[in-house]
Amino acid sequence: MEYIDIYDSEKRLTGVRLPRKDYFLKENQYAVIVVGLIERSDRRFLATRRSEDKKWAAGWWEIPGGGVRAGEASAQAIVREIKEETGLDVTDARGGLMYTYSRENLKKGDNYFVDIYHFHMDFDEGDVRVNSSEVTAFKLMTWDEMTALNQEHLFLHYDRLREGLEQESLYGLNCGRITRFAD
């Protein structure tokens, strides 16, 4: 069984571990999710399409990512998640943590931090090998294409990606600023 570490509202480990599936988080309990924006030198970004069997946002476009496992650091998790979903190894890519935001939904017990990473690396489409159990397709997109999908409500994390890129341009790469949102 896979477990996750629980963090407090300041993103500090609490020492509590829960099974990854079917948890219900209370006040001051948060999971951590990671997503990775991979940008090529031609200013195209790698986007993946969620499988149709996902219970939330099935078939939507997003950037690779997933949950941080118990005992795993956020930076380790993003490297693992990108490799699992796309076959790409971002270990030596330029970039890092760009932006962090949190969501709190006490009614659903779904409180989490999302660490958004931004990597710069060149790769060919042939280098991408999607994990068909999580991803049905991939596409190299321009920012305008991602914007168009967002306008159709078919792209996850778009607003936070935009905010992260804006913060990155103001504060430099690896700014890691935390912004909080509540449902």
Image (cartoon, rainbow, N blue to C red):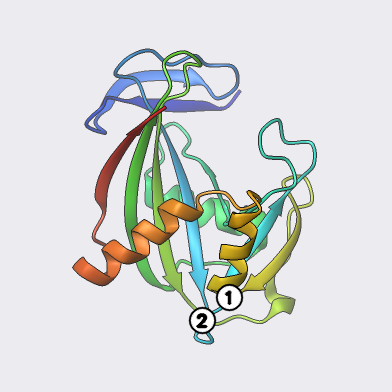
Nearer mark to the viewer, of 1 and 2: 1
Q: Which residue is mark 2?
A: 43
Q: Residue at x 60, y 58 (%)?
A: 83
Q: Amino acid at mark 2?
A: Arg
Whichever of labels 1 and 2 marks the residue nearer the N terminus, that label is 2
136 left or right, relative to 107: right
Disc assigned to residue 142: 1
Decide if residue 172 is in sight here: no
Name the quarter where the N terminus is drawn: top right
- Vertical position of residue 31 compared to residue 100: above or below: above
Label 1 residue SS? loop
- Kindly identify the residue that appears in the image at 73 percent across and 59 percent down: 130
Q: Is residue 146 placed above or below 123 in the rendered structure?
A: above
| x, y percent for residue 124 | 66, 82
User: Farthest bottom residue?
Assistant: 42
Tell me the residue at 47%/13% (across/down): 107
Which quadrant: the C terminus? Answer: top left
Q: CA distance from mark 1 to mark 2?
A: 7 Å
Quadrant assignment, res 56: top right
Mark 1: amino acid: Thr
Residue 3: image x %, image y %? Answer: 51, 25
- Please name the residue shown 49% across and 58% down the image: 36
Residue 51 visible in rendering:
yes
Residue 34, x across and y down, in percent: 46, 47
Whether label 1 touches label 2, CB < 8 Å:
yes
Task: Return the mark for residue 20.
Answer: none
Q: Name the residue at the front extreme.
A: 151
